[in-house]
Amino acid sequence: LWRTLTRDTAMTETILITGSNRGIGLELVHQYAAQGWQALACCRRPDQATTLNRLGEQFPNIAIYTLDVAQQDQVQQLAADLHDHPIDILFNNAGIYGPDDTVFGNTDEARWLECLHTNVIAPMQMMEAFLTHVAASKHKLIAAMSSKMGSMADNGSGGSYIYRSSKAALNAVMKSAAIDLAPRGVKVAILHPGWVQTDMGGPDAEITVAESVGRLREILGSVTPENSGTFFDIDGSTIPW
């Protein structure tokens, strides 16, 4: 625990966000905190997350936690620490692109497995660890940051074997979870953030981080039991698998 929770959290809507030290994760923390939500901001090195810490000083409803999603013991410990705290939205945002030199004939097994661990297995383990927290909440929603690059139908350029396969696998995991968790009243959203001006998206991307997060929040507010498990584009439309 990097900061303590506010005392009135039982009456506050809560979102837990992984990978919250920069980019979209950081802006998710910002916008939800500004709306009065309790934001549980998780990242690997809070002591180095200067901007996130400044945000935490600005908003007392932000609590910052040390969490490497690839470390199962840390996931289990955080779930235990928050055992009596309902979580309205569990947002699996943390992810990696993997090596950017992965072309046909130049793939590295260890780095591929690292990407699959972070982008697929870790979100699954987060869902398993925090299901009771989500099921005890008002909104009962689990979201995963995917990418249109995980779509088979949208793949017209090839390449990016490691990243594409990890996001396609994540989509499969989340779709199954939408079905399996429906009896608990838990909904699932699979999200494409758009081409965003982040470290990964680059400065020439189409939309700002703030614009992307604003639209993501709108989509999250529109998820129902009927459209749970949908692969949402940033404009709210459905991306083909």
Image (cartoon, grey):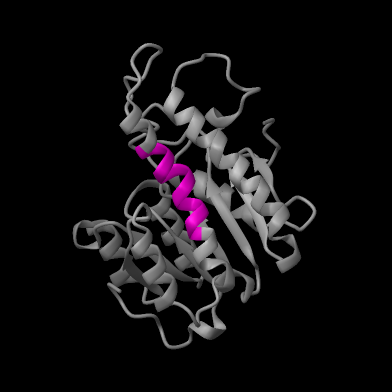
Image: 199 above or below 141: above
Residue 240 in which image quadrant: top right
Residue at the far left in the pictured view: 48
Which residue is depicted at the point 35% across and 28% down?
A: 109
Asked whether 116 falls inside the magenta stretch, the response is yes
Nearer to the camera, 213 or 75:
75
Residue 222 in which image quadrant: bottom right
Task: Please state the extent of the stretch shown in magenta in the rendering.
Answer: 114-126
Q: Quadrant of the N terminus?
A: bottom left
Nearer to the camera, 201 or 124:
124
Q: Position of residue 162 (x, y in %)?
A: 43, 28
Residue at the far front in the pictured view: 109
Q: Position of residue 113 (x, y in %)?
A: 38, 36
Q: Position of residue 101 (x, y in %)?
A: 31, 19
**Does the image show residue 237?**
yes
Which residue is depicted at the point 32% across and 32% down?
A: 111
